Image (cartoon, rainbow, N blue to C red):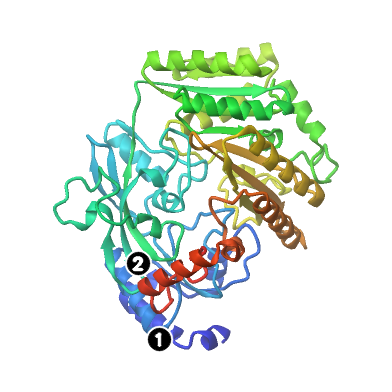
Amino acid sequence: MAAQIRFPGLEAALNDWETLLGTEAVTRDAERLAARSRATFATPNTTLAILRPADTCQVRRCLNIARRYRVPVYPVSTGRNWGYGSMALPGDGGVALLLDRMDRILDYDPELGTVTVEPGVTQQQLHDFLREQGDHFWLDVTGSSPHCSVLGNSIERGFGHTPYADHFAHVSGLQVVTGDGTVLETGFGRFENARAAAAYKWGVGPYLDGLFSQSGLGVVTAARLWLMPKPEAFTYFQVSIRDDAELEPLIDALRELRMAGHIRSAVHVANPFKVYSAMESYPWEQMNGETPLDPDIVRDHLDRLGIGAWSFSGALYGSREQIRVAKKAIRRRLRASLDVCQMRFMSVERLTTLERFKRPLGRLTRLPLDQMLAFMRALFGIKQGVPTDAMLPSTYWRKREPPPSDPDPDRDGCGLFWCAPVAPLKGADARTMVAIANEVFARHGYEPMLSMTVISERALDNVIALHYDRDIPGEDARAMTCYQELLERLMDAGYYPYRLGIQSMETLRARSGKGWNHTLARIREALDPDGILAPGRYPA
């Protein structure tokens, strides 16, 4: 009844959508809507229906119906945006436009390594396709599910692991449907015979692609992506430093190595809680059922594995000679100024040998090599563009039950917020962010899970995970208070997030400045005069 009052044309719109898409592609059932609307934190807004168009033409016609009846519509790729809102809506009720049926790989150039995909194409689907084409090019993947959208992560400006880690930087043109039903191609794609549309991302004239990333200004129905050429040689590296006080010189050393070109991949730097949670479940018995986790338990466990205060990993790509030179430079630079307690360079051949002899080696070293090598194999694969769900069980960190064989953080009441501030790639900035996170988390009783990523020669992203159990009464509110304080403290210090969850849209809008908000409002009015496309999404 409340929905009918807010949106009096809803029933007529649903009938028109069913005529357009078929009843099987329009979800009205309250139970199914509730299941698909749940996230890893409290989301008070209501999803009124889910539409599943099959192509760009149907997307355009869905938006035209939304305009006719003044019902807001929110595009979603596959809905696995865990920690940022999943499929829940940021606005005060509306209809989800789920694009998972649009799962075609539209074009592939085996010479240039470009591919055009729709929003329903998953990491696993594209990886399998590239293997079938001869495995000449790699996809840069995230550590999320293999079933997450490739296009969706690119449009959210997500990042991965290889030299192609900055996903939006490797987009060369979009197909977009705006709120008024206009279909447009960006870049050179707007010209019918442009042969360089997939090869040159800027096109000619104003560059529009950025307007449709992290915004509600249009529905992206296809994107041209650049793939990474498979290198002649590949080596994974993993390094750990002994002393927490060396974090600042570590970050500065990584900047120098990145700027010199010795490291071209993203480098992920993790604190002990992050490393422990990736390898182990919460030790409820050892903690007598109490939270937060005692840091001494973490330290004792990691000491047995030879892992220090901060650990980082990356990969080297190129010719064998290039990798040999890079390894030498990395060893020399790190050992010159840091107390390194562990440094491993792992080729495909070496990892295979370790896996073959893991049983006798495990007895000799008394280390859990089965577990360690399985985790290393997942990291190893990610840096070669192989999707994995090995990281997904960590979302169950504060749950009492072990992760199921088919993990679904939304379904199972896993509490998770991501807070991802960006800083200059300087050791002093890294230390400031860490100090803020440690202080806020300690006060609220959570473990600070920090993974800082060197995403370019000049920028450091600190992906901070806040884990909790949504099934405990009051935890949603307590975790939200912690998250909001963390975000505000970081922004007060000058560290703003590279990406927002649906719970943070208004917070950033208030800080964006009048000129920004005014300009984006005028653009939105031009592209979506009826205000039906994703109102409330991002400061736009």
The residue lying toward the viewer, choosing from 178 and 298, is 178
Q: Quadrant of the N terminus?
A: bottom right
- Callout 1 crowding tier (Cα within 10 Å): few <14, some 14–19, many ≥20: few
Q: Which residue is drawn at 40% across and 69% down?
A: 523
Disc on the earlier residue, 1 or 2? 1
Q: Tally the numbered discs.
A: 2
> What residue is pinned by disc 1?
12
Examine the rendered structure and indicate whether residue 357 appears above or below residue 222.
above
Q: Quadrant of residue 434?
A: top right
Element carrying mark 1:
helix
- Three-letter amino acid code of the residue under disc 1: Ala
Q: Which residue is drawn at 43% across and 31% down?
A: 384
Tag of residue 53: 2
Left or right of 395? Residue 213 is left
Q: In which quarter of the image is residue 422?
A: top right
Query: Residue 274: where, in percent of width, then height?
Result: 66, 37
Tag of residue 501: none
Examine the rendered structure and indicate whether residue 79 appears above or below residue 10.
above
Residue 289 visible at all: yes
Examine the rendered structure and indicate whether residue 306 appears above or below residue 82.
above
